[in-house]
Image: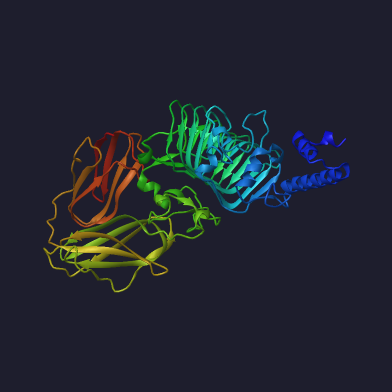
């Protein structure tokens, strides 16, 4: 009876020692007890803690925990929470490493095949990261940290996890976080690294995002390369699902069709208040969203005007999803999610113009703000040399607008100056905390101005033009002036001047951008000047 329970190695060993039946029975019993103890120990150490329930999730604290999770599909319906950052190294994926797997690397959690076993549980990263994940399965679909993920009611939740420096290769349905999602809620997650797919549905964060799934407060900075359709910086393909308060900044390239910086292919979801950088992308057109120049993409009012909820304003709500760092230290000056750093970044006053106009014995300084954040007011500094010391000239702080996303116009007249002397000016804004920022300098030379004899609007030069044209006009008397550009449909494109001006000759440039800062299309435009006793329209041609 005992021999049938012993493997040949143990049997020959024990027989060779001529152990008696009694002693053999004791030894065998001891071995069985040890074996059972070892099995129990291994089972207890499958995770670093927890029981896998919603109230007591399994704890993922190290690579061994991840390995057990990825290799045991019976665990894919449980609850998990990550309790520490996990860092892979190159040797983990090399021959002899725990995650080598014949060169295929990490085994995705959940099978991407629609008939396979999906991940149906919950994973809370608790703001931890997984660094250096490597997967090389170019012939397989459903490749990512999570392969196939599917929920129902309630949906599967994946949250608060960062996958950094990933290197993932697959066929179709390939992504950094989750290859394929249906009825899945993803929040506060991000990916960085490289994603390569040889078929469709390839994304930096998610490959396929469908069936009432949601993504919120997420981003991806991955290099995403696809050799088929539906390739996107954040999502490869979206179908009847939602994305809110999320962005992508990585490089995206594909060879067929449906290639997008944020989403490769959108089947049925509505795009609202979404923007892309026309200059860095080189793309003037998109199936959804609004193209903006790099400057406008790094200007917070572009987004607050569209209803984005920033930390430094309350007009769009108090959830404070977004922030921006004008020093360019964070996300290179583009908007980012406020949870990325947890601190308010004070935004400066946004000036659209700061000019100095000469008069007889005086200089008129004008500036226009498009927005102001905690702006206490302004100071004017003057010097007679560009690089010499500047001296404040206003007796008291010129009041600012505080917190405002509306346009404000300011004017200050510096009087009793010497004619034919060139003066330099800087503008300083001061916030509630005493922080300051300078704008300028600009210059002007007071002189007795020759007053034109009649109103006149000169032809712009050059015409046709790209990128700039110069507009000149004469005013024989002081008065209100409005200089406006219209398109062929009679729609207002931009207002170049609107306010009171002294008699004199004026010049200004137009760079082919609309009032909102967008580059206009090639075509014919009309320049109209209106004053109290004068009206004229000229035709201009803009060529891109």
Q: How many marks?
A: 0
Residue 478: x and y, percent? 22, 57
| Residue 147 in the figure: left or right of residue 194 | right
Quadrant where the C terminus is found in the figure: top left
Q: Quadrant of the N terminus?
A: top right
Q: How is the image coloured?
A: rainbow
* Residue 400 vertical placement versus 281 (above, below): below
Relative placement, left or right, of 310 versus 151 is left
Give whichever of 250, 399 is nearer the camera. Answer: 250
Residue 218 seen from this side: no
The one nearer the camera, 3 or 269, is 3
Percent coordinates x, y for residue 455 in the rendering: 18, 48
Q: Quadrant of residue 435?
A: bottom left
Q: Residue at x 79, y 41 (%)?
A: 17
Q: Residue furthest bottom?
A: 395
**Residue 36 drawn at (x, y percent):** 79, 45
Instruction: Using the image, determine if residue 79 lies above or below residue 339.
Output: above
Residue 188, image x, y percentages: 56, 49
Q: Quadrant of residue 541?
A: top left
Q: Is residue 70 left or right of residue 291?
A: right
Q: Where 357 falls versus 382 (above or below)?
A: above
Residue at point 61%, 32% (across, down): 112
Can the viewer see residue 206? yes
């Amino acid at each position: 009876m005992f021999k049938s329970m012993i493997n040949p190695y143990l049997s020959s060993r024990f027989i060779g020692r001529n152990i008696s039946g009694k002693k053999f029975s004791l030894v065998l019993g001891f071995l069985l007890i040890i074996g059972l103890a070892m099995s129990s120990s291994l089972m207890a150490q499958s995770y670093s803690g927890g029981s896998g329930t919603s109230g007591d999730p399994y704890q993922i604290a190290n690579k061994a925990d991840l390995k057990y999770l990825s290799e045991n599909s019976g665990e894919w319906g449980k609850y998990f929470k990550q309790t520490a950052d996990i860092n892979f190294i190159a040797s983990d994926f090399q021959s002899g490493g725990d995650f080598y797997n014949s060169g295929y690397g990490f085994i995705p959690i959940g099978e991407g095949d629609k008939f396979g076993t999906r991940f149906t549980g919950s994973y809370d990263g608790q703001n931890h990261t997984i660094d250096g994940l490597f997967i090389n399965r170019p012939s397989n679909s459903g490749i990512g940290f999570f392969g196939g993920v599917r929920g129902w009611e309630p949906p599967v939740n994946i949250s608060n996890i960062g996958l950094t420096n990933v290197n993932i290769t697959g066929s179709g349905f390939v992504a950094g976080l989750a290859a394929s999602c249906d009825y899945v809620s993803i929040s506060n997650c991000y990916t960085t690294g490289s994603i390569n797919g040889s078929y469709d549905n390839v994304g930096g964060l998610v490959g396929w995002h469908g069936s009432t799934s949601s993504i919120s407060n997420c981003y991806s900075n991955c290099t995403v390369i696809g050799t088929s359709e539906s390739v996107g910086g954040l999502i490869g393909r979206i179908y009847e699902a939602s994305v809110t308060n999320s962005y992508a900044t990585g490089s995206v390239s594909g060879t067929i069709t449906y290639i997008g910086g944020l989403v490769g292919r959108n089947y049925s979801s509505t795009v609202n208040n979404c923007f892309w950088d026309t200059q860095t992308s080189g793309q003037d057109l998109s199936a959804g969203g609004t193209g903006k120049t790099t400057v406008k993409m790094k200007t917070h009012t572009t987004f607050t005007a569209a209803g984005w909820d920033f930390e430094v304003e309350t007009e769009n709500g108090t959830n404070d999803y977004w922030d921006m760092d004008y020093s360019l230290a964070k996300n290179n000056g583009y908007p980012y999610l406020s949870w990325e750093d947890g601190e308010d970044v004070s935004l400066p006053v946004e000036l659209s113009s700061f000019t100095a106009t000469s008069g007889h014995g005086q200089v008129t300084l004008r500036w226009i703000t498009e927005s102001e954040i905690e702006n206490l007011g302004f100071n004017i500094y003057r010097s007679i040399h560009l690089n010499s010391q500047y001296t404040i000239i206003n007796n008291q702080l010129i009041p600012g607008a505080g917190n405002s996303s509306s346009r404000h116009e300011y004017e200050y007249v510096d009087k009793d100056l010497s004619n034919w002397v060139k003066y330099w000016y800087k503008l300083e804004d001061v916030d509630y905390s005493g922080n300051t920022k300078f704008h300028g300098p600009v210059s002007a030379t007071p002189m007795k101005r020759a007053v034109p004899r009649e109103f006149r609007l000169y032809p712009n030069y050059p015409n046709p033009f790209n990128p700039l044209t110069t507009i000149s006009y004469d005013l024989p008397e002081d008065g209100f002036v409005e200089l406006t550009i219209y398109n062929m449909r009679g729609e207002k494109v931009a207002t170049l001047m609107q306010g009171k001006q002294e008699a004199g000759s004026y010049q200004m440039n137009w760079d082919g951008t609309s009032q909102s800062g967008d580059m206009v299309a090639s075509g014919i435009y009309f320049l109209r000047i209106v004053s109290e006793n004068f009206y004229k329209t000229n035709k201009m041609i803009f060529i891109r």
